Amino acid sequence: MFSAVKKHLIVLWLVVLIALNLGYFFQFQDNRNDDAYITYRVARNLFKHQTFSYNLGESYLVTTSPLSAIIFAPFTAIGKENFPLIANYICNLFLIAMLISVWFFLLRKEPDFSLIIFLSVLFVIPMFYFLLGMETNLFIFLLFLAILLLINQNFVVSGLVSALACL
């Protein structure tokens, strides 16, 4: 393990990245992606009609992320007009969860400085914020978590998380 000073610096690094994340998020929170509306409609139909479809009475898998539709489904009760903003908040929570999972990993290991630089750059890439509302942040979070679990030799849970990322 490493010194308390290094731990404090990693905590400070996390706080700065979360602040940057929130700054980006509030700048792009109203961003809308038309592809995401397919998943929103599937989520709404799943919640309201207990059917996993875009059009009622059809049984085609039209969403690229069934897991996102399942996660979004209960939140569609908020209303069709407000839901895209709620979905953006949910997707940003996946980014923050990714930051926190990396933070726990860094506190347990002696991190390489290049890893910290890479992660710092990764979390301020505007792409994550342009794609709010879509499954991208959930997918990246789950893959990141699976890799961290794999590094910690938690093979079964890593495999399960990887499988979830494919849904």
Image (cartoon, rainbow, N blue to C red):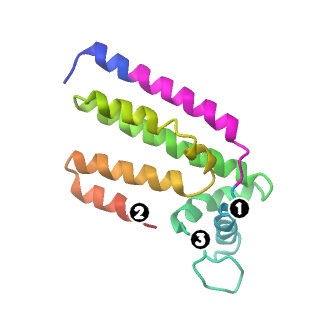
In three-dimensional space, the C-alpha distance between marks 2 and 1, rounded to whole angstroms, equals: 24 Å
Location of residue 12 with respect to 66 vertically, above or below = above
The kind of residue tagged 1 is Asp
Closer to viewer: mark 2 or mark 3: 3
Q: Which residue is mark 3?
A: 63
Residue 9 percent across, percent down from the top left: 36, 18
Badge 1: few (under 14), some or many (20 or more) residues near its Cα, within 10 Å?
Answer: few
- Secondary structure at numbered mark 1: loop
Q: Quadrant of residue 13?
A: top left
Is residue 55 found inside the magenta-colored segment of the image? no
**Residue bearing the label numbered 2:** 164
Instruction: Report whether 81 appears left or right of 132.
Output: right
Query: Picture coordinates of residue 109 (x, y %)?
Result: 23, 32
Report which quarter residue 83 is drawn in. Answer: bottom right
Residue 165 figure quarter:
bottom left
Residue at 58% across, 48% down = 91
Residue at 50%, 38% in the rendered image: 96
Q: Amino acid at mark 2?
A: Leu
Tell which circle, 2 or 3, labels the residue nearer the N-terminal end.
Answer: 3
Q: Which residue is mark 1?
A: 34
The residue lying at 69 percent from left, 56 percent from top is 33
Residue placed furthest toward the top: 5
Task: Provide residue 155's location: percent of width, then percent of height.
Answer: 22, 56
The local crowd at label 2, few if under 14, some if 14 to 19, many if 20 or more residues have their Cα within 10 Å, is: some
Of the residues under marks 3 and 1, which one precedes in the sequence?
1
At which x and y percent is residue 119? 40, 36
Q: Nearer the viewer, mark 3 or mark 1?
A: 1
Amino acid at dot 3: Thr
Majority SS type along the magenta span: helix
Q: Residue at x 46, y 41 (%)?
A: 97
In magenta, the rendered stretch is: 11-32
State how far apart marks 2 and 3 are (Cα).
15 Å
